[in-house]
Image (cartoon, grey):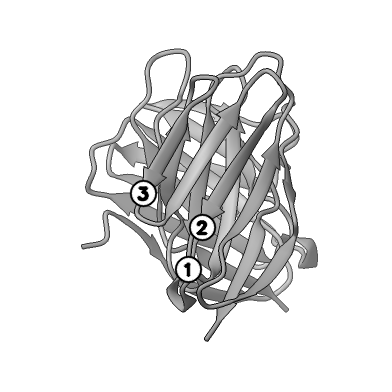
Amino acid sequence: ILNVEQSPQSLHVQEGDSTNFTCSFPSSNFYALHWYRWETAKSPEALFVMTLNGDEKKKGRISATLNTKEGYSYLYIKGSQPEDSATYLCASPNSGYALNFGKGTSLLVTP
Amino acid sequence: DAMVIQNPRYQVTQFGKPVTLSCSQTLNHNVMYWYQQKSSQAPKLLFHYYDKDFNNEADTPDNFQSRRPNTSFCFLDIRSPGLGDAAMYLCATSIAGPTLNTGELFFGEGSRLTVL
């Protein structure tokens, strides 16, 4: 079983601050790394799916990097806004279809 | 428009009273999943269907069953809910190849189960 760990567990920043979270995973038998954003009372939505070492992906103010050799991914949010408040989940599949999730990082952005 | 729809959003049941949660999708995806998320824990995969093939996770209790009568619908049946089964249940879909899934998951909004 692939253990996915996320830190910090929660984060509180002011509007306009930039922030980042970490997702770590065992580097052996790597297939892909997913990031999801889960806003309260909504469905989790995919932000990025990354497969190659050194991948960097960007969507607006949010970007992610991937290091498969050392087993970590960073998610960055530039100039955080209140609408960025959500739980950010990372996940990685095992050899089959099970996507193993971390516990998430809960982000609160206050004006 | 919602593409993965779960019903009900909130379900309250009594200890031992069977519950069925439903999930429908308009994406025509071949894989459907049920995840359980308890408070402050990681979502945990209970089982998934690849087309009609059912795949149970080794540690999913027998109390949890699933049905997929067609591509669009999938059900989660909890035969005798216990207090420990109170959780958010998430349905998700994806397009996947025959042996591995690296495609993104599309989730419903979840069904929150309370057991009294």
Callout 1: chain: A
Q: Which residue is mark 1?
A: A84
Identify the residue at horizontal 56%, vertical 70% (top origin). Answer: A17
Q: Are marks 1 and 2 in contact (CB under 8 Å)?
A: yes
Disc 3/disc 2 C-alpha distance (Å) = 10 Å
Disc 3 crowd, CA 10 A, few/some/many (<14, 14-19, 20+)? few
The quadrant of the image that shows the N terminus of chain A is top right
Q: Secondary structure at mark 2?
A: strand
Disc 1 crowd, CA 10 A, few/some/many (<14, 14-19, 20+)? many
Looking at the rendered structure, which numbered label has been put on residue A59?
3
Q: Amino acid at mark 2?
A: Ile
Identify the residue at horizontal 48%, vertical 27% (top origin). Answer: A55
Q: Is residue B45 left or right of residue B116?
A: left
Disc 2 crowd, CA 10 A, few/some/many (<14, 14-19, 20+)? many
Looking at the rendered structure, which numbered label has been put on residue B111?
none
Image coordinates for residue B7, horizontal then vertical, percent? 40, 66
Quarter of image, res A14 = bottom right
- Say if residue B82 shows up in the picture: yes
Callout 3: chain: A
Q: Amino acid at mark 3?
A: Lys
- Say if residue B46 shows up in the picture: no
Identify the residue at horizontal 53%, vertical 23% (top origin). Answer: A54
Image coordinates for residue B26, horizontal then vertical, percent? 22, 48
Identify the residue at horizontal 60%, vertical 17% (top origin). Answer: A95
Q: Is residue B29 left or right of residue A104?
A: left
Q: Which residue is mark 2?
A: A77
Are both tags, 1 and 3, on one chain? yes
Q: Secondary structure at mark 3?
A: strand
